[in-house]
Image: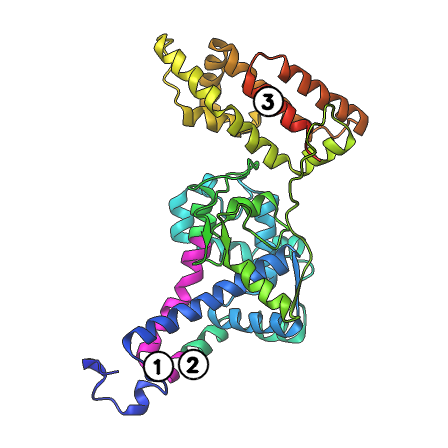
Amino acid sequence: MNLNGLMDLPSWANGFVELPWWGYIAVALLMTHITIAAVTIYLHRHSAHRALDLHPAVSHFFRLWLWMTTGMSTKAWTAIHRKHHAKCETEEDPHSPQILTLKKVLLEGSELYRKEAANQETLDKYGHGTPDDWVERNIYTRTDKGGVALMLVIDILLFGPLGLTIWAIQMLWIPVMAAGVINGVGHYYGYRTFQVEDASTNIVPWGILIGGEELHNNHHAYASSARLSNKWYEFDIGWLYIRVLEMLGLAQVKKLAPQVKMEAGKAKCDLQTLQAVITHRYDVLARFTRSLRTTCAEELRRMREHKSGHTIDLQTMKRWLHLDAKFVPEQEKAKLDEVLSTSKILATVYSMRQELAMLWQRSTANKEQLVSQLEDWCRRAEKSGIAPLRDFSRTLRCYA
């Protein structure tokens, strides 16, 4: 490669590998993609959530690569991520943009990671089941900067001065794409397939650049699933790699998100219905919201036409429907109560959604009581006079 600033250097000083300009870009993208694959397959799905088992050779390759490209230890990353799920969107969440602001998580994601990695209580409580062999204790953890220094030497030897640029891109990739984009944007902007209790979103339906982690809402709905894609139009490249490893005998998938099954024509709720509704609770709530979206929109339009004084739009109403009452922001509660007091339809829709969510939150009721409460909910929904709510209750009975 003949670049003006490098022409006068000895041939060996330009690195042992000479490529066209686009070749260096391809190498940088390939190396960063391997790092992303190591994070999503090894750290995230294997170590943190036990969604799959990996062959020791694959695990150690990922450990070595992550040591050289991020300096992160398996125990620290696993512990911090598990704490994120346990304390999501609370003051104890290590990196919630809902608490810390999106700007802080985007710009200071790696600093937030290092701060939490220094918290021994977090490591002790959430870091169980991670590697604790001689290599981990004496090399990967003790000399965390040694790996990235070794990567710098390798890049410069292979690609000469341009290796420094490739190395810099490698060092920035995880802090920007994972610590910033996934932890930040993935809890702020995007679409939601499942109405989970936190603010997680799917950034885009095609998980390629960040290994499938773009499908973050799907992950929070079924955290222990090895596959992050859920809808037919979603693509998780990390799952593709896992399937290849599985076909080669280098991985074994342990857990996947349960598939929704329906028993057509079911006229009454039973224990099977209850178990299916609880298992697929996020799908149930999402289906409820979709079913009542038009009803809410029409009622809001009617209220505007009658000049009721309310300026609530459909997006605001959808947000209220998505949330359990305890998660509605204090500044919006008075506005919500005012709107519900004006519209019997919206009040019914909202209260029925809250009651439905309470079914899997009641720890004191036995199975028979919960089945009875579910059936009672369906009967009241059918007698509500709201056709979409009636139709939804009939669909709810068919969960199997």
Q: For numbered disc 1, what is the local secondary structure? A: helix
Residue sticking out furthest to the left: 4
Disc 3: which residue: 391
For label 1, the crowd category at 10 Å Cα-Cα, with few meaning under 14, some 14 to 19 and many 20 or more, is many
Give the magenta range. 154-180
Q: Earlier in the sequence, mark 3 or mark 2?
A: 2
Check residue 323 for magenta coloring: no
Disc 1: which residue: 159
Q: Position of residue 195 (x, y in %)?
A: 55, 35
Task: Name the residue: 47% across, 20% down.
Answer: 296
* Residue 398 higher or lower than 190, as above or below: above
Q: Position of residue 254 (x, y in %)?
A: 69, 57
Q: Amino acid at mark 2?
A: Ile
Q: Amino acid at mark 1?
A: Phe
Distance (Cα) linking label 1 and label 2: 8 Å
Q: Position of residue 61 (x, y in %)?
A: 57, 74
Q: Earlier in the sequence, mark 1 or mark 2?
A: 2
Mark 3 vs mark 2: give the one in front. 3
Q: For numbered disc 2, what is the local secondary structure? A: helix
Distance (Cα) linking label 3 and label 1: 64 Å
For label 3, the crowd category at 10 Å Cα-Cα, with few meaning under 14, some 14 to 19 and many 20 or more, is some
Task: Name the residue: 46% across, 73% down.
Answer: 148
Which quarter of the picture shows residue 45? bottom right
* Residue 394 higher or lower than 258, as above or below: above
In-image side of 222 versus 97 (left or right): right
Disc 2: which residue: 154
Mark 1 vs mark 2: give the one in front. 1
Q: Amino acid at mark 3?
A: Asp
| Front one among 113 and 279 | 279
Mark 3 vs mark 1: give the one in front. 3
For label 2, the crowd category at 10 Å Cα-Cα, with few meaning under 14, some 14 to 19 and many 20 or more, is some
